[in-house]
Image (tube, rainbow, N blue to C red):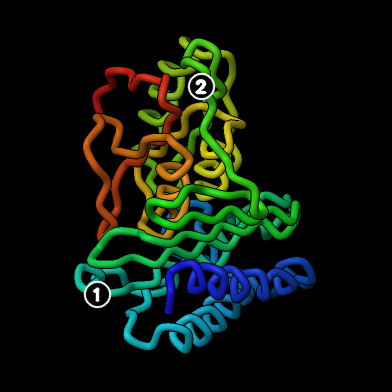
Amino acid sequence: MRKEHLLQEMTDIVKSCEDILLSATDMERKIHRKTGKGNFVTDYDSKVQAILQSRLLELLPEAVFLGEEDQMDSTDISKGYAFIVDPIDGTANFTRNYHASCISVALALDGFPILGVVHNPYLKETFTALKGQGAYLNGERIHTSDRTLAEGLILFGTTPYHADLTRKSFEIAYRYLSQAEDLRRSGSAALDLCMVACGRAEFFFELTLCPWDYAAGALIVEEAGGFVSDLKGRPLTYDRRQAVAARGPRVELVDVSV
């Protein structure tokens, strides 16, 4: 199957799950706590992941599947195809009807994303990318902005599941904000990455994210002309938790200790 066709099929599968988010009700009875402050899973996360796993593996049976509700250590994505999936990124937002959540799916080959889809059902915005062929929003080509950090909008995640990193997160956010125009915190890393990709913001970071949080969004940023790395500029991998930074081409990383 050609990769362009595979991306379209992936996109259709992701978008077919949007009604599960949009019609969610009786949230209080369907929330379950996971380890860490503010770390939730809902029955809807599990339902979306089950649908995605079934349909994506029908589409590409030779792939392995790594979803947020799985054990990362038991899934090897280093060889062959792997779907890397966050069924609802921004679950805390979702539980509060805050409307800043999305479905994120990447297809990796030998450990690195080659296709990516991030779908925001509330705004009907679908970000897609195919390695080497650009990034798109609802079918229209997108690019990172050409603003500098001094002109930039900073996005960041507070790493709420890891209390030991909270102070450091705000210290780094302050370092960037002191050189930029303003700062935002959305609660969805995948959406923040897409905001950088389409030029609505210039920089995003979070001190620890899992591959399903950033795999699709990182590819979308790169294909839109931006850069992704850790906070020291080192390349990302997609097999473990790590710090993630995304930026437009005219934004320089600030020297921070992490």
Quadrant (top left, top right, bottom left, bottom right) of the C terminus: top left
**Horizontal side, residue 179 vs residue 230: left or right:** right
Judge whether 36 appears above or below 164 on screen: below
Q: Which mark is drawn over residue 130?
A: none
Task: Indicate the position of residue 27 as horizontal and vertical percent values.
Answer: 72, 68
Judge whether 161 appears above or below 84 on screen: above
Amino acid carrying mark 1 in the image: Gly
Neighbours of disc 2 within 10 Å: few (<14), some (14-19), many (20+) = some
Tag 2 residue: 146
The residue drawn where x is 57% and y is 29% is 201
Tag 1 residue: 80
Judge whether 245 appears above or below 130 on screen: above
Quadrant (top left, top right, bottom left, bottom right) of the N terminus: bottom left
**Horizontal side, residue 167 vs residue 25: left or right:** left
Task: Indicate the position of residue 32 as horizontal and vertical percent values.
Answer: 56, 70
Q: Earlier in the sequence, mark 2 or mark 1?
A: 1
> Element under label 2?
loop
The residue drawn where x is 51% and y is 27% is 202
**Horizontal side, residue 200 vs residue 117: left or right:** right
